[in-house]
Every structure is written in structure tokens, then in C-alpha cells.
Image (cartoon, rainbow, N blue to C red):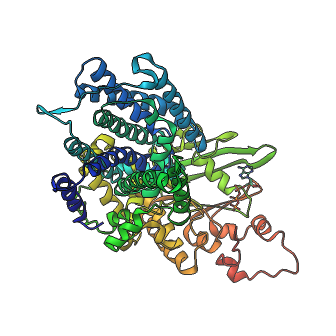
Amino acid sequence: MKKWSVPVFILLLALLPVVPGVPEFWINQLNAIGIASLVVIGLVVLTGVGGLTSFGQATFVGIGAYATAWLSATMDGSPWLGLVLGIALTLLLAFMLAQITLRLSGHYLSLATIAVCLIFYYLYGNMPFLGRHDGIPGIPPISLFGYSLLQAQSIYYLIWLAVLLAAWTAINLLDSRTGRAIRALKNGEKMAASFGVHTFHYKVIAFVYAAVLAGLAGWLYAHEQRAVSPSTFGINYGIEYLFMMVVGSVSSVWGGIFGAAVILILKDQIQDIAPRLLDTSTNFELIVFGVLVVLVLHHAREGLWPIVSRIFSGRRDDRQVAGGTATQWWNQAAALAKADRPQAGRPLLQVQQLRKEFGGLVAVNDISFSVAAGQIVGLIGPNGAGKSTTFNLITGVLPLTRGSIIYCDKPLQAVSAEDIARLGIARTFQHTQLLPQMSVLENVALGAHLRRSAGAIRSILRLDRHDEAALLREAAVQLERVGLGDCMFELAGNLSLGKQRIVEVARALALDPALLLLDEPAAGLRYMEKQELAAVLSGLRDEGMSILLVEHDMDFVMKLTSHLVVMDFGTKIAEGTPAQIQQNDKVLQAYLGGIDDDVIIDETAANAGENIEVRA
Ligand SMILES: Nc1ncnc2c1ncn2[C@@H]1O[C@H](COP(=O)(O)OP(=O)(O)OP(=O)(O)O)[C@@H](O)[C@H]1O
């Protein structure tokens, strides 16, 4: 969006109620849009960005609404106390539900939120003190500095102030260390864990944040409508909030508000027009919403907001703008502290009698090798040799059957991927795992996650800038180090595969690792891209970085490593310097399937390691 669009939007909102001739109906409609927007902003963070689908947000709206209704209408309490009670109950319930539901993944989580919504709907409708199905009428208006917000025009300002504050907090949250972790939940949970991101913690943050916004919406709703009943907190409303997000935007806070407006205006128009046209009171809006959502999912997966936003600004969407126009405000930040490095030559990683069985298949058969500080060790072997399995055992992705992995005198076999990162081991992935909708800079900053501690509250209130500057500066330093300084504001998904692999190296370096694990970094790269990657890794070798490299491309491996471990059918068949390995009969047999008398090997090329190129 253009810079002026937010101030203009705020100005229009502020002036609308005082413009002569504006019908009261418009104000009521805008109040409803504002209240729904609060819920949808939470859903954008939770579902659109975090990938955790909740059908149950109406439950939290109900908690906020019923808490204040009960306190202010039946106990004569202040609506402001009602707000405190509503938010406290929402926080408590959301936190408890998060512990149960967020351990479920995929559609199980969605089903759990549906179940919760149904349970609360029946509780609201059957609790005598909540007025059963009749609900609670006679809720007093909110008073502010002795002024009663009785009219639609007066509560309008409170509602939209809440929406703007919610939008500000959500944008702050997403544009932070916490936000990067939440964004990684959707398609990069395992990747994030391998950089020390405690993913469950961030799921809870997103869930509780969205619930609190829904609870706040419920409080405003109760005092705007002056009555509550269970029907507005049922599962159909939970689904409607999701529709608003899908139609508006799955990643933009402003798009969420837009989606709420589209759905509520459409609903109102259909409810007005359909009975006149068709002489029936059937809920046609549900049919129209269903069709609209299917069309949006087919033709505009990101929602309608990017299209609208593009029309007004000429840019793709506001997330791209966030990266694209960023000034290097973080340039002056102090450099992050570096961990002490083990002395060169000291044993860093020792793999002893490592074994992995998949049922009857022995994928890794009691292999042992070690990596010393400052050494680059290559782990090679034909397809199916067990290299990736070994890599996954070391990085904590797979549990081992037996054996031991010692890193700096600490056993790693029972350590999670998250804690392995804390010990200073960073990795890249065989299939690149960047977050394509995030800028290159932010992707790399995710690698430095553990090196700063700013949490959700500081992020929401924008008190995290010191930490954020340090993380972004570190990301920029690592990108310059690997030669990609000029790509930092591009979306990661726009880069070529070769550059994406180098960005992965930069992200791993941002962790400040003592050991770098590279899983087939040259896979799928073109010749020139391989050359660029090789230059980056040679630079790291010259700086004394310790690396374990799993790779198929022999030319690439031979030029880079000082020591090779060769596997075949899960077993270590050879170990030694590149020159020794090139002369090793077992290795040649493993790669060429036995040396046939008819086969003539070009000695010169073999010495250069060029004729043993194998691909997965
Ligand atoms: N999750 C799994 N379940 C069952 N078998 C597996 C699993 N993962 C790997 N394997 C098997 O273990 C053996 C070793 O596989 P692995 O992927 O480690 O080999 P690799 O050397 O990395 O091969 P490539 O170079 O083709 O990636 C193969 O026979 C493979 O089919």
C-alpha cells in the first residue's frame, strides 16, 4: 500500500459519522465490520500466516461478550471490569485449549476447534446464570470519561480505535523475531526447529493472540448490541469469520478488514434483495459465500486484497512492500556476540557405531567417523547408501537404533533438532526450505533466532527494535559474506535454485555455528551455480569453518574436502583423503557396479575426480 493510504483511511473513518446525511444504518454496518475485523485480524495471524486453522473464534467472542454481559447486566459491575474479566477468561481458556489442541496437527486441530465451538454454544444456551437460549438483555453502554457510548456514532469511535490498535499490534507482531517464527509455522516447522525455534511456543502465542482479539470483539459487541444470546457465537459464525479471512487476505492485516467488509456488506445486501426477488426467507447468503470462497480459492489463493491493493498501489502486496522498501535502518546496530570456537584440530563430532534400522532394512550399519574443528569432511556414496539417513540421525530428525553421536563431548542421540541448533550446529536441506513469501533478509534472520530474545509482548508494542536491528544486521552481514548482499530485499521464492541454496548457507551461518551440515548443496544446480556455491564454501573453508558435506557431485566434493567417508548399502566402505578415495577399488566398484575388463577408466579424469559423477 502507498504510505498515505493508512492516514487517509483513518481520516475517512474519523469524518464519516459527522458528515451530514450519512445514514445511521451505515454507522451500524461499520460497527459490525469493525467488530468482525478484530476477529479476522487475529485469524490472519493464526490461520492465514501461521497455518493453524480455527473454526472456533466465535467461542472467544462469546467468552468476551458473556463475561461483560453477566458482570455488567446481572451484577451491576462496570463494563470496564467486564473487559478485564472477559480478557482474563479468554486468556485462560485459550491457553488451556492451546495446550490440548495445538499438539494436534493438520485437520485434527480444525476438528478440535469445531468441537470446542459446539461445546461452548451448548454451554451458553443451557447455563441458567447466562440466561439459557434467551441470553442476557439490558447490558449497559460503556462510559468513557463520564460520557456514555449509547449511540451507534459514539461507540463507533471506540470500535475503530480498537481495530486500528489491533492492526498496529498485528503488523508489529508479524514484522519481528516472533513474527518470523509464526510465519515459519505454516510450511517450515521442521526447518524452524532446526534453527532453535520452539515452534509449539509460537503456536500458543498466535492462538492466544487471536483469541484475545476475539474476546475484545465480544466485549464491544455486547455493549454495542446491549444484549447477547448464544446464536451469534455458534459454529456458523466461526465459519463466517474464516470466510472473511479467505476472501480478504490470508497474509495482510488490512486485507482481513477488507474481507470483513466484503462479507458483511454482501450479507446485508443479499438478506435485503433475495426475499424480494425470490419471495422466500432462505439464507441465500450462505450459498453465495460458499460459491465466493470456492472461486477465491481457485483464482486468488491469497484473497482479494492483493488484487485491490495492486490496483491502488501498483505493487504486488503489502508483505512484498515491507521487504522491498525497507531502508537499512538496522545498519548501525551493534554486531551480535559470537560464541567461542573449538580449537582447530580438536575433535568436534564423533559418530560411533551408528545404526538405523527401518523395520528389516538396515539403512545405516554401525558406521563410525569423526569431524575435527576446521575440517571439511565429505560423506559420499551411491544412491540409497544411507547418507541422508546418517545426516538425519546427526541433526535429530530421526531417532537412531543404536550407537552414539558425540558433539564437543556431549552426547547428541537424545537431543531434539531444536537443542542441536542451540549447541551450535546449523544445517541446510536437501530440498531447499526457504519461506518463499518472506524476503531473503528475513529468511536469513530466522537463522539468527537464538541469538536474541525479544518476545511477543515486546514485538507487539514495538519495543523490540534494538534486538530486531541486531538480527537484521547479522542477516545482512551473512548475505554479504556469501555474495548475495544485493538480493536481500527480494522475496526468497523469486530466486533461482542456486541462489536459494546459497541463501540457505547464509541462514545457517547466521546461527553462528561451530559445525555446518550441508545436505546435497549442489543438487539440481547448473554448472555456473555450482561454481558460485563452490566459491562460497571454499571461502568458508579458508575461514576455518568445520563442515560435514553430503554430496553426490564428486568434482564438487573432491575440490572442497580434506577427508572423505564413503558409504554403500549402509556400511562404511572407505575413508581417507580425496586422493586415496579416488584410488580405492571398493569405492570404484560401488560407483561403477564392479570394474569390468572392458571398461576403460580415464586415469587423468579419475585423478581429478571428474569421471565419477553420479546423480540421485
Ligand atoms: N523413512 C524410511 N523408511 C524406510 N526406509 C527408508 C527410510 N528412509 C530411507 N530409507 C531407506 O534407507 C536406505 C538409505 O536411504 P538414504 O536416503 O539414507 O540413502 P542416500 O544415500 O541418502 O540416497 P540418496 O543419495 O538417493 O539420497 C534406502 O534403501 C532407503 O530406501
Nearer to the camera, 156 or 452: 156
Task: Residue 103: give x, y in percent of width and height.
Answer: 54, 36
Q: Position of residue 38 (x, y in %)?
A: 34, 45
In this picture, residue 57 sits left or right of residue 138: right
**Direction from residue 194 to residue 594 in the image, left or right:** right
**Quarter holding the N terminus?**
bottom left
Name the one closer to the observer, 498 or 115: 115
The spot of residue 328 in percent (x, y) is 25, 65
Residue 131 visible, this orientation: yes
Can the viewer see residue 196 in this picture? no
What residue is at 58 percent from the left and 69 percent from the top? Answer: 522
For the point 23% across and 28% down, which residue is it?
80
Task: Please state, as top left, top right, bottom left or bottom right, where the C terminus lies in the image.
Answer: bottom right
Residue in front for this viewpoint, 397 or 22: 22
Q: Residue at x 20, y 55 (%)?
A: 16
Quadrant of the picture in which ligand 1 is shown: bottom right
Q: Residue furthest right?
A: 597
Residue placed farthest to the left in the image? Answer: 146
Dividing the picture into quarters, in which one does residue 447 lie? bottom left
- Numbered disc total: 0
Instruction: Locate residue 97, reporting x and y percent.
Output: 48, 31
Vertical side of 62 occupied by 8: above or below: below
Q: Is residue 246 left or right of residue 261?
A: right
Give 266 or 547, whichever is nearer the viewer. Answer: 266
Task: Indicate whether 6 appears above or below 279.
Answer: below
